Image (tube, rainbow, N blue to C red):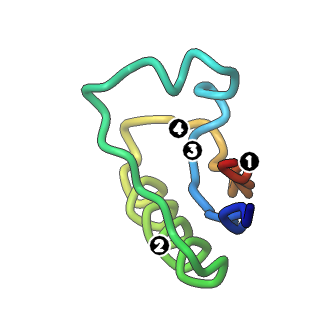
Amino acid sequence: METAPTLILYAYTGKWDLGDERWADRTVPDYFYEDKDAARKDMLGLHATLEADPDDSYPPLCLERIETVPMT
């Protein structure tokens, strides 16, 4: 029996969100990318937007690599 391939996806999140609990909040939309460069580009764009706001302080953003477990 053939198994499905392993998928590699990329996402970014703020450092304050690290941990399994970040996946439990279903009010936040998921942004997954199949391409690391596309994820990095969007993450850096968000970083530039947040950095331009002098009144707020935001935690660093992290690029995450997510590898799925193949279905059997």
Which circle marks residue 13 in the picture? Answer: 3
For disc 4, the marked residue is 58
Return the x and y of residue 7 as percentages of the image width and height: 66, 65
Q: Which of labels 1 and 2 is toward the front?
A: 1
Most foreground residue, 36 or 9? 9
Q: CA distance from mark 3 to mark 1?
A: 21 Å
Q: Which amino acid does the dot numbered 1 rest on?
A: Val
**Residue plotted at (63% across, 49% down):** 61
The quadrant where residue 52 appears? bottom left
Q: Earlier in the sequence, mark 4 or mark 1?
A: 4
SS at badge 1 = loop
Q: Which amino acid does the dot numbered 3 rest on?
A: Thr
For disc 1, the marked residue is 69
Q: CA distance from mark 3 to mark 4?
A: 11 Å
Q: Which of labels 4 and 2 is toward the front?
A: 2
Q: CA distance from mark 4 to mark 2?
A: 16 Å
For disc 2, the marked residue is 42
Return the x and y of residue 53 as percentages of the image width and height: 36, 51
Q: Which amino acid does the dot numbered 2 rest on?
A: Asp
